[in-house]
Amino acid sequence: MIELEGLTKHFGAKVAVDHLSFTVRPGVVTGFLGPNGAGKSTTMRMMLDLDNPTSGTVRIDGRHYRDLAEPLKYIGALLEASKAMHGGRSAYNNLLCLAQSNRIPASRVREVLDLVGLTAVARKKSKGFSLGMNQRLGIASALLGDPEILMFDEPVNGLDPEGIHWIRNLMKQLAAEGRTIFVSSHLMSEMALTADHLIVIGQGKLLADTSMADFIQENSRSYVRMRSPQRERVLDVLRAEGLTAVEAGSGVLEIDGATAEQIGELAARHQITLHELSAQRASLEEAFMQMTAASVEYHAHAAGEHGVPAEAPPGAPTPPGAPDQPGQPAVQWGRSYEERRRRRSSRKGA
Ligand SMILES: Nc1ncnc2c1ncn2[C@@H]1O[C@H](COP(=O)(O)OP(=O)(O)OP(=O)(O)O)[C@@H](O)[C@H]1O
């Protein structure tokens, strides 16, 4: 388990990490998301005692990293893989040095090289390695001490599809063994397939600490997609039920406020023929863009656009309190995590 309490890091006037408190639990893969510059790498570096916090604490299974006598046996990490290795040494010798400093037997070096598929190049100098091979070597070093906690910063960087599939399954398998797995990635489709739980930060602050399913549900629009040859009749029936439908082209209606089951039964009661009926849910990427829109620090401008605040993703609903007039101040429309949590608990209590 990794516990952060009020973790804060200033670089001069820049607040990179701002009072972060959360717990990364064992048995699941926890994804760590945030726009560029949100503070993910700085947070991970502080977890490993590679950066000193300005204030706040990180505990690894209840202890500070610096109090762990042989840290690789507690926590393994892949951070910027190629920088962590000595390019003039072979893959085997790089790992052996790490192993010796943590009283890990040499047999374990051969084991992890085999696990990551580098046995054939074990005696080659790592400076000649490709990005993907370096990534595998970094993963081998993280696994060396057979730790209960593993952290991976952008683990699929440079890996080919087979490598991506392999690391995804490895992380799931390690979590299933009851280990704590914390992983950052910019690849939302990959994160959606790997993580069970999400920690999302923006401008150093916690935006969400929630399950993958709840994150997508709470930050995206879900609706029912329907096609019928009796379009006018459908619209009448929906109107009578107080449901709103939006025309989406090619005869498709998008309906809010009811489930696919409810709409299917409604159509059956009115003997309406349906050619299509399906529940639609946004992807993790859409949900992520909607939640973090207000805290995106670096974003590309569309042609002709200058100096305007980060925009909502296409198709996103109008933010609450959005100004109607151009020239008004930037809207903070990603609802804060605290506000969201308050709403959720008041809904549960109702
Ligand atoms: N050593 C440093 N000195 C000054 N500023 C820094 C330093 N390291 C990070 N920063 C700043 O702190 C902020 C957070 O950076 P960090 O690299 O942790 O973000 P990140 O979420 O990992 O970003 P990315 O997704 O782009 O890798 C950024 O604004 C960055 O410029």
Image: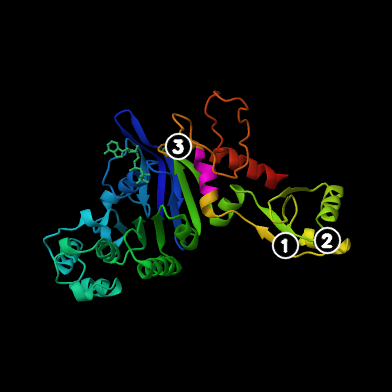
Residue 303: which disc?
3
Residue 291 part of the magenta-drawn span = yes
Magenta stretch, residue numbers:
287-293
Amino acid identity at mark 1: Leu
Residue 190 appears in the picture as rendered = yes
Where is residue 166? Give x, y as percent: 38, 70
Label 1, on which residue?
Answer: 277
Indicate the secondary structure of the residue bearing disc 1: strand
Q: Is mark 2 within 8 Å of ligand 1?
A: no
N-terminal-most mark, 3 or 1: 1
Q: Nearer the viewer, residue 49 or 183?
A: 183
Where is residue 151? Give x, y as percent: 35, 57
Label 2, on which residue?
Answer: 267
Crowd class of label 3 (few under 14; some 14 to 19; many from 20; radius 10 Å):
few
Residue pictured at 28% horizontal, 47% vertical:
49
N-terminal-most mark, 2 or 1: 2
Where is residue 344? Give x, y as percent: 64, 45
Query: Magenta part mainly helix, strand or loop?
Result: helix
Indicate the secondary structure of the residue bearing disc 3: loop
Where is residue 315? Give x, y as percent: 60, 45
Of tags 3 and 1, the one toward the viewer is 3
N-terminal-most mark, 2 or 3: 2
Direction left: furthest residue: 88
Distance, label 2 to label 3, CA atoms, is: 45 Å
Residue pictured at 43% horizontal, 65% vertical:
175
State yes or no: discs 3 and 1 in contact (Cβ < 8 Å): no
State yes or no: discs 2 and 1 in contact (Cβ < 8 Å): yes
Distance, label 3 to label 1, CA atoms, is: 38 Å
Image-quadrant location for residue 115: bottom left
State the quadrant of the C terminus: top right
Image-quadrant location for residue 109: bottom left
**Side of 100 where 195 appears, left or right:** right
